[in-house]
Amino acid sequence: MKDFIKPENIKRSQLVRPAYRVNGAIYLMKREMINNGKNIYSESTLPYIMSAKSSVDIDTLDDFEYAEYLMKKSLGTLYK
């Protein structure tokens, strides 16, 4: 695997700009927009930046167990 990681692509993580992605956690829109067959994103779409712990993508049993662990840990801190 020659040139797998090119030296010019190696950067300190502190120098890399944050990256965001749509996670599907929160959508607020008028009811009519849900089934109109059009794109729900527009120029007026606003982001809501969530922490990684608040935005666990659950696709596997491991993902579910991790989310469950985070939830129990979070609930435990509420009652201490």
Image (tube, rainbow, N blue to C red):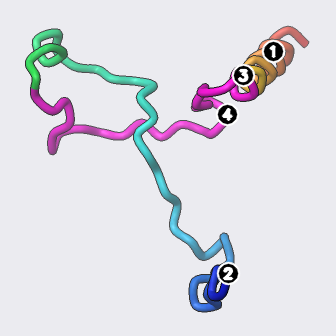
Rendered image: mark on residue 53: 4
- Looking at the image, the residue that sits furthest to the bottom is 8
**Mark 2, other Cα within 10 Å: few <14 / some 14–19 / many ≥20:** few
Residue at mark 4 to residue at mark 3: CA–CA distance = 17 Å
Residue type for callout 1: Lys
Q: Are marks 4 and 3 in contact (CB under 8 Å)?
A: no
Q: Are marks 1 and 2 in contact (CB under 8 Å)?
A: no
Inspect the magenta stretch and tell me whether residue 57 lies in it: yes
Residue at mark 1 to residue at mark 3: CA–CA distance = 16 Å
Residue type for callout 4: Lys
Residue at mark 2 to residue at mark 4: CA–CA distance = 34 Å
Q: Which residues are magenta?
A: 38-64
Determine which residue is flagged by label 3: 61
**Mark 1, other Cα within 10 Å: few <14 / some 14–19 / many ≥20:** few
Is disc 4 placed on a helix, strand or loop? Answer: helix
Q: Name the magenta segment's main secondary structure.
A: loop
Rendered image: mark on residue 72: 1
Mark toward the viewer: 1 or 3:
3
Is disc 1 placed on a helix, strand or loop? Answer: helix
- Looking at the image, the residue that sits furthest to the front is 1
Look at the image and tell me in which quarter the N terminus lies. Answer: bottom right
Is disc 2 placed on a helix, strand or loop? Answer: loop
Q: Residue at x 70, y 21 (%)?
A: 64
